Amino acid sequence: MGEKGLKWLEQLWQCFLSIVKILLQSKWGTRLPSSFSNPDELLILANGPSLNRTVEESADFIQGKTLLAVNFCVSSPMFERLRPELYLIADPLFWIVPEKRVQLFKTMAEKTTWDMNFFVPARALKDKEWQPLLAGNPHIKLYIYNTTPIEGFQSFCNWIFRKGWGVPRPHNVLIPSIAMGLRLPFRKIYLAGADHSWLPEITVTDDNVVLMHQKHFYDQNKSQADTVKQENLNSARLYTILYHMHVAFKSYFILEAYARKLGKEVINVTPGSYIDAFKRMKI
């Protein structure tokens, strides 16, 4: 059997495994919001350090688009300034480290004075403690989405993505954010703050401790290099970090193919972004 045949069998096996994961992990019939200020254009505000520059220098571009914020954007004054209609979290540490989710949800409940659709992973339903933190704010509407990792033939993946039963392997919050944007009616999805410029920020100490300086727009002046925590809270080795990067960057090509199949565009407006899958645009 040739290389093509082996690749076909591998993808077939991945499809089978994806189906098993869907049956075990995915929640059926997830709801979606139906009303948006601009149903054609979505701007995803990723948390990379360049977002500050984009917001300050490109206010006209941001104006009038539906905005989606992620993870700890709520901890920044930018959250109240931009008033995003959509908000999505994906970091598994929210459900492993209680302090993280308490900090996020309390801040969100206090700051959100406009209607906002909040997407949380289906795995969050296993933990009931966080829900009362948001229950007192009538502006926050909760939506569940599946983070089940899907692999296999592109046509198979596209079908699963449309159903909302899973996403490309979600090694960062931008992947499910784009996947969610593509499930919604938007024809153009813009990415800001999607720097992904982690490679130059990785170092290894003389004690073989791997450090990465993960800068965000809200902490770039005070953040420091630190170990990368895995879901088991152990520090990741270099090969693990690089593998996760490989998976993430590959997922963007899967999403780009999915977008083209839908007749939609994902456009990266992040200056200096390392993501090489999407069309670029200077703003």
Image: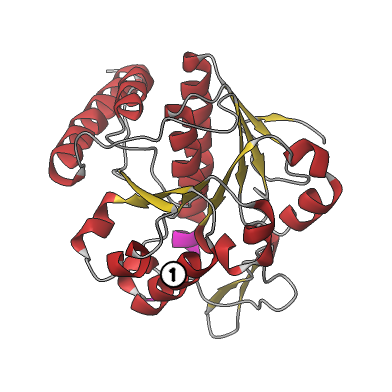
Question: Would residue 251 be counted in the magenta stretch?
Answer: no
Instruction: Tell me if residue 14 comes above or below residue 88 in the rendering.
Output: above
> Which secondary structure, mark 1?
loop
Seen at 31% across and 37% down, the residue is: 166
Colour mode of the rendering: secondary structure
Residue furthest right as drawn: 57
The image quarter in which residue 223 lies: bottom right
Taking the image as shown, residue 41 lies to the left or right of residue 154, namely right
Pointer 1 residue: 236
Seen at 63% across and 30% down, the residue is: 278
Q: Quadrant of the N terminus?
A: top left
Q: Give the crowd class for mark 1: few <14, some 14-19, many >=20 residues within 10 Å.
A: some
Asked if residue 212 can be seen in this view, the reply is yes
Residue 253 placed where, x, y %?
52, 31
- Kind of residue at disc 1: Ala
**Magenta segment, which residues?**
234-241
Q: Quadrant of the C terminus?
A: top right
Residue 34 placed where, x, y %?
42, 30
- 156 or 129, which lies in front? 129
Asked if residue 232 can be seen in this view, the reply is no
Residue 268 placed where, x, y %?
68, 36
User: What is the total number of numbered labels drawn onto the structure image?
Assistant: 1
The image quarter in which residue 22 lies: top left
Seen at 37% across and 23% down, the residue is: 158
Residue 55 placed where, x, y %?
77, 51
Seen at 78% across and 49% down, the residue is: 54
